[in-house]
Image: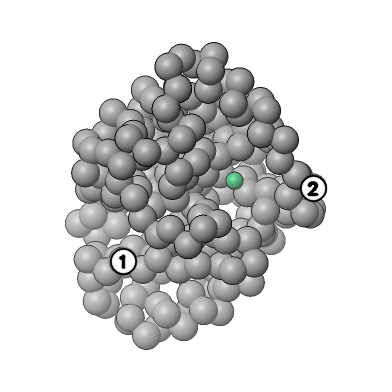
Amino acid sequence: MIFRQLFDHQSSTYTYLISSGKGREALIIDPVIENVKNYINLLKELNLKLVKVIDTHIHADHVTGASKLKNITNCSTIMGEHSPAETVEIKVKDDELINLDNLKIKAMYTPGHTSDSYSFLMNNYLFSGDTLLINGTGRTDFQNGNAKDSYNSIFNKLLKLPEETLLYPAHDYKGEKVSTIGKEKKHNPRLQVSSVDEYIDIMNNLNLKKPVKIESNVSKNIKLGA
Ligand code: FE
Protein backbone atom coordinates (compact mmCIF):
# COMPACT_ATOMS: atom_id res chain seq x y z
CA MET A 1 0.00 0.00 0.00
CA ILE A 2 1.10 3.56 -0.70
CA PHE A 3 0.04 6.20 1.82
CA ARG A 4 0.89 9.89 1.94
CA GLN A 5 -0.24 12.55 4.41
CA LEU A 6 -0.03 16.01 2.84
CA PHE A 7 -0.40 19.31 4.67
CA ASP A 8 -1.85 22.64 3.52
CA HIS A 9 -0.20 25.38 5.57
CA GLN A 10 -2.80 28.04 4.79
CA SER A 11 -5.77 26.12 6.26
CA SER A 12 -3.88 23.49 8.31
CA THR A 13 -5.69 20.82 6.30
CA TYR A 14 -4.45 17.26 5.94
CA THR A 15 -5.02 15.65 2.57
CA TYR A 16 -4.48 11.91 2.16
CA LEU A 17 -3.35 9.93 -0.84
CA ILE A 18 -3.93 6.20 -0.76
CA SER A 19 -3.11 3.54 -3.31
CA SER A 20 -2.89 -0.22 -3.36
CA GLY A 21 0.52 -0.02 -5.00
CA LYS A 22 2.74 1.24 -7.81
CA GLY A 23 1.11 1.54 -11.20
CA ARG A 24 -2.31 1.17 -9.67
CA GLU A 25 -5.40 3.06 -8.61
CA ALA A 26 -5.17 5.96 -6.19
CA LEU A 27 -7.64 7.89 -4.10
CA ILE A 28 -7.33 11.33 -2.52
CA ILE A 29 -9.25 12.44 0.57
CA ASP A 30 -9.94 16.16 1.19
CA PRO A 31 -7.83 17.82 -1.53
CA VAL A 32 -7.18 21.58 -1.30
CA ILE A 33 -7.61 23.47 -4.58
CA GLU A 34 -4.34 25.44 -4.30
CA ASN A 35 -2.36 22.20 -4.03
CA VAL A 36 -3.79 20.30 -7.00
CA LYS A 37 -0.61 20.76 -9.02
CA ASN A 38 1.40 19.12 -6.22
CA TYR A 39 -1.00 16.17 -6.10
CA ILE A 40 -0.71 15.68 -9.86
CA ASN A 41 3.09 15.77 -9.64
CA LEU A 42 3.06 13.30 -6.76
CA LEU A 43 0.75 10.94 -8.65
CA LYS A 44 3.14 11.07 -11.64
CA GLU A 45 6.16 10.52 -9.43
CA LEU A 46 4.54 7.49 -7.80
CA ASN A 47 3.19 6.24 -11.14
CA LEU A 48 -0.40 6.16 -9.90
CA LYS A 49 -3.74 6.68 -11.57
CA LEU A 50 -6.16 8.83 -9.59
CA VAL A 51 -9.58 7.18 -9.82
CA LYS A 52 -11.47 8.60 -6.86
CA VAL A 53 -11.56 11.74 -4.76
CA ILE A 54 -13.48 12.05 -1.51
CA ASP A 55 -14.53 15.09 0.49
CA THR A 56 -15.41 14.17 4.07
CA HIS A 57 -17.82 17.13 4.25
CA ILE A 58 -18.44 20.60 2.83
CA HIS A 59 -15.48 22.52 4.18
CA ALA A 60 -15.73 26.07 5.49
CA ASP A 61 -12.06 26.96 5.70
CA HIS A 62 -10.70 26.03 2.29
CA VAL A 63 -11.91 25.22 -1.20
CA THR A 64 -11.86 21.60 -2.29
CA GLY A 65 -9.72 20.52 -5.23
CA ALA A 66 -12.20 17.78 -6.19
CA SER A 67 -13.53 19.41 -9.37
CA LYS A 68 -10.11 20.49 -10.55
CA LEU A 69 -8.74 16.97 -10.01
CA LYS A 70 -11.70 15.53 -11.88
CA ASN A 71 -11.07 17.85 -14.83
CA ILE A 72 -7.44 16.79 -15.03
CA THR A 73 -7.67 13.05 -14.27
CA ASN A 74 -11.33 12.18 -14.91
CA CYS A 75 -11.53 10.63 -11.43
CA SER A 76 -14.91 10.09 -9.76
CA THR A 77 -16.04 12.45 -7.01
CA ILE A 78 -17.42 10.96 -3.81
CA MET A 79 -19.18 12.33 -0.75
CA GLY A 80 -21.70 10.95 1.71
CA GLU A 81 -25.36 10.84 0.76
CA HIS A 82 -26.17 13.79 3.07
CA SER A 83 -23.96 16.13 1.04
CA PRO A 84 -25.72 19.18 -0.43
CA ALA A 85 -23.25 19.14 -3.35
CA GLU A 86 -25.32 18.27 -6.39
CA THR A 87 -22.46 17.52 -8.74
CA VAL A 88 -21.00 14.73 -6.60
CA GLU A 89 -21.08 11.62 -8.79
CA ILE A 90 -21.09 8.94 -6.11
CA LYS A 91 -22.95 9.56 -2.87
CA VAL A 92 -22.15 6.79 -0.42
CA LYS A 93 -24.33 5.61 2.43
CA ASP A 94 -23.39 4.79 6.00
CA ASP A 95 -21.48 1.46 6.02
CA GLU A 96 -21.06 1.41 2.25
CA LEU A 97 -17.74 0.11 0.91
CA ILE A 98 -15.65 1.98 -1.63
CA ASN A 99 -13.29 -0.20 -3.68
CA LEU A 100 -9.78 0.78 -4.64
CA ASP A 101 -8.23 -2.26 -6.33
CA ASN A 102 -8.04 -4.77 -3.47
CA LEU A 103 -8.49 -2.10 -0.75
CA LYS A 104 -11.87 -1.46 0.82
CA ILE A 105 -12.77 1.84 2.42
CA LYS A 106 -15.87 1.94 4.59
CA ALA A 107 -18.01 5.08 4.75
CA MET A 108 -19.28 5.98 8.23
CA TYR A 109 -21.91 8.65 8.68
CA THR A 110 -20.62 10.82 11.53
CA PRO A 111 -22.65 14.05 11.64
CA GLY A 112 -22.07 16.77 14.25
CA HIS A 113 -19.36 19.07 12.91
CA THR A 114 -21.69 19.44 9.92
CA SER A 115 -24.81 17.49 9.03
CA ASP A 116 -23.03 15.98 6.02
CA SER A 117 -19.84 14.78 7.76
CA TYR A 118 -18.57 11.30 6.98
CA SER A 119 -15.55 9.42 8.25
CA PHE A 120 -13.79 6.74 6.22
CA LEU A 121 -12.20 3.58 7.55
CA MET A 122 -9.59 1.60 5.64
CA ASN A 123 -8.28 -1.38 7.60
CA ASN A 124 -7.03 0.29 10.80
CA TYR A 125 -6.75 3.77 9.28
CA LEU A 126 -9.57 6.11 10.27
CA PHE A 127 -9.96 9.31 8.24
CA SER A 128 -12.19 11.23 10.58
CA GLY A 129 -12.63 14.50 8.69
CA ASP A 130 -13.41 17.15 11.31
CA THR A 131 -15.55 14.83 13.43
CA LEU A 132 -12.73 13.71 15.70
CA LEU A 133 -9.49 15.68 15.85
CA ILE A 134 -6.30 15.00 17.80
CA ASN A 135 -6.97 16.44 21.28
CA GLY A 136 -10.13 18.07 19.97
CA THR A 137 -13.38 17.65 18.09
CA GLY A 138 -14.79 19.59 15.13
CA ARG A 139 -16.72 22.72 16.06
CA THR A 140 -20.49 22.40 15.72
CA ASP A 141 -21.62 26.01 15.33
CA PHE A 142 -22.31 26.27 11.58
CA GLN A 143 -23.50 24.28 8.53
CA ASN A 144 -26.18 22.47 10.59
CA GLY A 145 -23.59 21.37 13.09
CA ASN A 146 -25.00 19.81 16.22
CA ALA A 147 -23.16 19.03 19.45
CA LYS A 148 -25.42 16.11 20.37
CA ASP A 149 -24.87 14.52 16.95
CA SER A 150 -21.14 15.07 17.38
CA TYR A 151 -21.26 13.28 20.75
CA ASN A 152 -23.16 10.35 19.27
CA SER A 153 -20.89 10.07 16.24
CA ILE A 154 -17.79 10.11 18.41
CA PHE A 155 -18.86 8.13 21.46
CA ASN A 156 -21.23 5.65 19.85
CA LYS A 157 -19.36 5.12 16.61
CA LEU A 158 -15.73 6.19 16.33
CA LEU A 159 -14.68 5.35 19.89
CA LYS A 160 -16.17 1.85 19.45
CA LEU A 161 -13.44 1.08 16.93
CA PRO A 162 -10.45 -0.91 18.24
CA GLU A 163 -8.13 1.20 20.42
CA GLU A 164 -5.18 0.66 18.06
CA THR A 165 -7.08 2.23 15.13
CA LEU A 166 -4.96 5.04 13.67
CA LEU A 167 -6.64 8.42 13.68
CA TYR A 168 -5.94 10.67 10.70
CA PRO A 169 -7.99 13.88 10.97
CA ALA A 170 -8.62 16.55 8.31
CA HIS A 171 -6.87 19.24 10.35
CA ASP A 172 -4.31 19.80 12.98
CA TYR A 173 -3.20 23.20 14.23
CA LYS A 174 -0.39 22.05 16.50
CA GLY A 175 1.72 19.85 14.26
CA GLU A 176 0.25 16.52 15.42
CA LYS A 177 0.09 14.04 12.57
CA VAL A 178 -1.55 10.89 13.83
CA SER A 179 -3.11 9.48 16.98
CA THR A 180 -5.05 6.37 17.92
CA ILE A 181 -8.58 5.81 19.16
CA GLY A 182 -7.11 4.55 22.45
CA LYS A 183 -5.01 7.68 22.98
CA GLU A 184 -7.91 10.01 22.21
CA LYS A 185 -10.21 8.11 24.58
CA LYS A 186 -7.70 8.62 27.38
CA HIS A 187 -6.26 12.06 26.66
CA ASN A 188 -8.55 14.12 24.38
CA PRO A 189 -9.86 16.82 26.78
CA ARG A 190 -13.23 17.05 25.01
CA LEU A 191 -13.83 13.36 25.55
CA GLN A 192 -13.29 13.36 29.31
CA VAL A 193 -16.96 14.21 29.93
CA SER A 194 -19.39 12.20 32.02
CA SER A 195 -22.53 12.99 30.05
CA VAL A 196 -23.82 14.14 26.68
CA ASP A 197 -25.02 17.38 28.32
CA GLU A 198 -21.55 18.16 29.60
CA TYR A 199 -20.19 17.71 26.06
CA ILE A 200 -22.92 19.90 24.56
CA ASP A 201 -22.14 22.57 27.12
CA ILE A 202 -18.44 22.58 26.16
CA MET A 203 -19.24 22.73 22.44
CA ASN A 204 -21.78 25.53 22.85
CA ASN A 205 -19.29 27.70 24.72
CA LEU A 206 -16.20 27.51 22.54
CA ASN A 207 -16.67 31.09 21.28
CA LEU A 208 -14.58 30.51 18.17
CA LYS A 209 -14.14 33.06 15.41
CA LYS A 210 -15.89 32.29 12.14
CA PRO A 211 -13.47 31.01 9.48
CA VAL A 212 -12.38 33.75 7.07
CA LYS A 213 -14.25 33.52 3.76
CA ILE A 214 -16.66 30.89 5.11
CA GLU A 215 -19.54 32.01 2.87
CA SER A 216 -17.51 31.99 -0.33
CA ASN A 217 -15.74 28.73 0.59
CA VAL A 218 -19.02 26.94 1.32
CA SER A 219 -20.71 28.18 -1.85
CA LYS A 220 -17.68 27.11 -3.91
CA ASN A 221 -17.50 23.73 -2.16
CA ILE A 222 -21.16 23.01 -2.87
CA LYS A 223 -19.97 23.01 -6.51
CA LEU A 224 -16.91 20.93 -5.52
CA GLY A 225 -14.68 23.94 -6.11
CA ALA A 226 -15.69 24.27 -9.79
FE1 FE B 1 -14.71 21.26 8.51
Q: Secondary structure under badge 1?
A: strand
Residue at image x 75%, y 44%?
Answer: 209
- Residue type at numbered disc 2: Glu
**Dots 1, 2 in contact, CB < 8 A:** no
Say which amino acid is labelled 1: Phe
In this rendering, the answer to whether 117 lies above or below 127 is above
On the image, the x and y values in percent for residue 37 come to: 56, 79
- In the picture, measured across the screen, residue 142 lies left or right of residue 13, that is right
Q: Is residue 156 visible?
A: yes
Mark 1 — residue? 3
- Judging depth in this view, the residue of 34 and 160 nearest the camera is 160
**Mark found first going from the N terminus, 1 or 2:** 1
Task: Report whether 107 appears left or right of 175.
Answer: left
23 up-or-down from 25: above or below: below
Give the quarter of the figure containing the C terminus.
Answer: bottom right
User: Could you say where residue 92 lies in the image, as x and y percent from the top left?
Assistant: 44, 39
Question: Residue 14: image x %, image y %?
Answer: 49, 60
Q: Which residue is mark 2?
A: 215
Q: Residues within 10 Å of mark 2 (few under 14, many from 20)?
A: few
